[in-house]
Image (cartoon, rainbow, N blue to C red):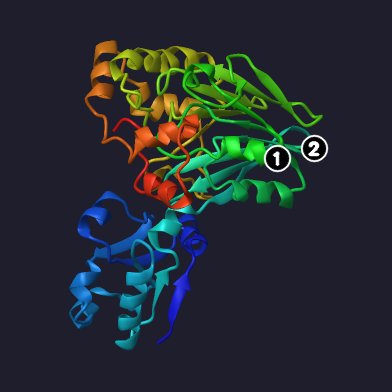
Amino acid sequence: MTVTAWTAAQVARKVIDNKEFFILDVRNADAFEEWKIDGHNFDYVNIPYFELLDGVEEILPQIPTDKDVLVVCAKEGSSIMVADMLSEAGREVGYLAGGMKSWSMYLEPIKVGDLANGGELYQFVRLGKGCLSYMAISEGEAAIIDAVRFTEVFTKFAEDKDVQIKHVFDTHLHADHISGGRHIAEVTGATYYLPPKDAEEVVFDYAPLEDGLTVNIGSSAIEVGALYSPGHTIGSTSFVIDGKYLLTGDILFIDSIGRPDLAGLAEDWVGDLRETLYARYRTLAEDLIVLPAHFMIMDELNADGTVAKRLGDLFAENHGLNVEDEEAFRSMVTDNLPPQPNAYQEIRHVNMGKITPDNDEQTEMEIGPNRCAVR
């Protein structure tokens, strides 16, 4: 039997297209429990590779023969070894090229919808980390919002679309992943925007992203309007694009709300979080389509792979938007905080420009699941 190398892009299509898949994850149990490849119709078995050094015969009954089988490890070496052993035992299997490292890095661009006068809005879905980035395009110009660190994905996409990146925004100072916004601005000549209240410690120049700021994209004047919405951070700022889409950053998700503690100020910021969700957002049109900067679970993906939902539906369905008693809300938020993201303090310092780790160090910082939401 031949062993197939599956790319992260191919696995992503399995997720988005709701296909069946069987994954044999040969990482240690703690790594598997913390973070794995999630799919709507994926089945799993976790057997650390060191338990398979003497052979795979004992696990063959656990490996199906009626669906695609993928062997996964951290960086691919162990999965190739196990996949070869299964192949020698007569099984048709594949391995994930680049391992979980490649899964963490992969971005799938998906069109969200059309904007005025032929414009387009794209969502870049980072399935392995739960990050969501955006590119608005109009008449040869583009704006990028909440770009992750794989900057060539965005610059290549813009090149393929024959548009010039003019504006790059971060809705807030990110703590769970390294932003690519400043670097994209440097290589393209675009203007980089960051909320001043989140930028007090940054060591680089930026354009202030403040409440009421409007930046036009293209001569068709698609407006990227800023809305101050603190709570996840004190500077968090949302966007309304073309009067149709609400980009909420890490304040509001499809199935949850943002955590207020990643700068150590949960008790201080929980009031801001409630004010944003229960007052500021309530003044907005309920037909706005919410586009967050993260998702937590696969159930938040739509059939086309996008993460998007009408604001009015979230007011009705999202539990975090339906806690009437303020003290109960405070308790729900501060008592249900998940573990901090991996290396979040170091990531904040990278995004401030204070430290410049190499690529391998950045990869290590970002390994693990997204943890920006209140449980």
Residue 207, quarter of picture: top right
- Residue where numbered disc 1 is placed: 188
- Residue drawn at (45%, 32%), measured in percent from left and top? 174
258 horizontally vs 203: left or right? left
Query: Does label 2 or label 1 sit earlier along the sequence?
Result: 2
Q: CA distance from mark 2 to mark 1?
A: 17 Å
Q: How many marks?
A: 2
Residue 209, quarter of picture: top right
- Residue where numbered disc 2 is placed: 139
Q: Residues within 10 Å of mark 2 (few under 14, many from 20)?
A: some
Q: In terms of depth relative to the viewer, which is nearer, 338 or 276?
A: 338
What x and y, as percent, mark residue 226?
60, 20
Q: Looking at the image, can residue 186 be seen?
A: yes
What x and y, as percent, mark residue 149?
52, 44
Q: Residues within 10 Å of mark 1 (few under 14, many from 20)?
A: some
Q: Looking at the picture, does residue 298 appear above or below residue 78? A: above
Q: In terms of depth relative to the viewer, which is nearer, 202 or 341?
A: 202
- Residue drawn at (45%, 77%), measured in percent from left and top? 4
302 horizontally vs 364: left or right? right
- Residue drawn at (35%, 12%), measured in percent from left and top? 271
Q: Looking at the picture, does residue 361 appear above or below residue 133? A: below
